[in-house]
Amino acid sequence: MVTSATANAPFVARLNKAGNRLAAIGRAVTLLGVVLPLLLIGILKFTAIEIEALRPFVENTPWLAWLYPALGFAGASYFLGVVELATALLLVASVRSVWAGLVGGAIGSVTFALTSSTMLTLPIWETGSGGFPFLNGLGAFLIKDVALLGVSLVILGSSLQQLVSDLDRES
């Protein structure tokens, strides 16, 4: 006798396969979604326009303001650019290397925690629309970093899980 469970098995298997495929595509798009901004904005850090555009972010954020006395305007921008580009490359390598995932996920998490936290000190609310919850251009630019922080934390956490799994297999 054919039960409904066995009759539905091929359909359920196809759903599962489709779900696995969609999840894999989603992971790739998610990784691309964090790597592209890091690469594109990281490259900008080496231009005069970006060096100048960074000034209000760095000068008005107490935990970043030390960069200018320590490195100068261009040096601070170059430093941030190197960090962003290295993080992007590490996150790309995380697909094949648990260690790249650990380092890239950790640096990405710190980077996006810092950039997200600048929303606490910078004017991000559109006053002409009544302020909170209406973001101005700066707020709209920065709010994405909350999602990028989440992606970096997922990569870091997944890499830690993979490392533990690899160590368990070795012992």
Image (spheres, rainbow, N blue to C red):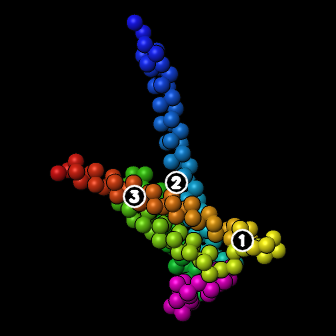
- Residue 59 part of the magenta-drawn span: yes
Please indicate whether residue 105 sits to the left or right of residue 63 in the image: left
* Percent position of residue 63, x then y: 52, 84
The magenta span reads: 51-72
Residue corresponding to mark 1: 132
Which one is nearer the viewer's eye here, 54 or 120? Answer: 120
Closer to the camera, 121 or 44? 121
- The answer to whether residue 39 is seen in the rendering is no
Q: CA distance from mark 3 to mark 1?
A: 33 Å
Q: Residue furthest bottom?
A: 69
Identify whether 70 is placed above or below 2.
below
Dominant SS of magenta comes to helix
Residue beneath the point at 57% across and 64% down: 146
Q: Nearer the viewer, mark 3 or mark 2?
A: 3
Q: Are there few (<14), some (14-19), or many (20+) residues within 10 Å of tag 1?
A: few
| Foreground disc of the pair 3, 1 | 1
| Callout 3 amino acid | Gly
Q: Mark 3: which secondary structure?
A: helix
Label 2: few (<14), some (14–19) or many (≥20) C-alpha neighbours in 10 Å: many
Numbered badge on residue 157: 3
Numbered label attached to residue 31: 2
